[in-house]
Image: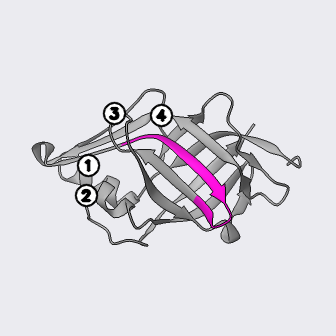
């Protein structure tokens, strides 16, 4: 990898057990606005134009990257309704987080996940970063998981 590799996409399954619960309950998971479902059930979001998220030589992300697309989880006749839109990965002195817009109107952002940059690992043209549910994120997932629950790792693909 180059000293400053640009990030092309963010792939994230959010939480495999949550996806299995929604689909097992007869619900649906729909993607839109550019997001795609991967073969393993995760979601891929392309980098928005002009993003400033890069990967340093050690594979750790730096800056802020905006990604486009949305995922909607629906089950129990609408009683469970979760929207995750336009993820943003942002790094700072305190570490890294993933925020999402929690509705299709995209008028409010919530910190959904905290990332463990110290445990980031390269896998081919991707960097895999462990994630855990942020304090505010538990409400987004319908309070099914307590804060700091492990989530699926975030994968960043470089150009």
What is the C-alpha distance between the residues marked 3 and 2? 17 Å
Q: Which mark is residue 107?
A: none
Please tell me which residue is depicted at 69% across the width and 71% down the height of the picture.
118
Q: Residues within 10 Å of mark 1 (few under 14, many from 20)?
A: some
Q: Residues within 10 Å of mark 2 (few under 14, many from 20)?
A: few
Provide the secondary structure element on which disc 4 rests.
Answer: strand
Quick check: marks 4 and 2 in contact, CB under 8 Å?
no
| Image depth: mark 2 or mark 1 in front | 2
Taking 39 as reference, is 17 above or below it?
below
Give the residue number, with chain letter if any, for mark 3: 104
Taking 67 as reference, is 137 above or below it?
below
Q: Which mark is residue 36?
A: 4
Give the residue number, with chain letter if any, for mark 1: 23
Q: Which residues are magenta?
A: 84-96
What is the C-alpha distance between the residues marked 4 and 2? 23 Å
Percent coordinates x, y for residue 107 in the rendering: 37, 37
Q: Nearer the viewer, residue 31 or 40?
A: 31
Please tell me which residue is depicted at 41% across the width and 36% down the height of the picture.
70
| Quarter of the figure with residue 137 | bottom left
Percent coordinates x, y for residue 1 in the rendering: 85, 49
Q: Which mark is residue 142?
A: 2
Percent coordinates x, y for residue 128 in the rendering: 64, 58
What is the C-alpha distance between the residues marked 4 and 3? 16 Å
């Amino acid at each position: 990898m180059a000293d400053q590799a640009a990030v092309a996409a963010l792939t994230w399954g959010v939480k495999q057990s949550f996806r299995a619960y929604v689909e097992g309950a007869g619900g649906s998971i729909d993607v839109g606005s550019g997001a795609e479902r991967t073969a393993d059930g995760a979601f891929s979001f392309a980098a928005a134009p002009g993003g400033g998220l890069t990967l340093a030589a050690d594979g750790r992300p730096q800056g802020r990257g905006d990604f486009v697309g949305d995922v909607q989880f629906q089950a129990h006749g609408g009683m469970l309704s979760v929207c995750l839109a336009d993820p943003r990965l942002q790094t700072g002195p305190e570490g890294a987080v993933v925020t999402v817009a929690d509705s299709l109107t995209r008028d409010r952002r919530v910190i959904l996940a905290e990332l463990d940059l110290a445990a980031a690992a390269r896998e081919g043209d991707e960097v895999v970063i462990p994630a855990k549910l942020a304090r505010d994120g538990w409400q987004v997932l319908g309070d099914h998981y307590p804060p700091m629950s492990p989530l699926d790792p975030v994968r960043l693909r470089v150009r």
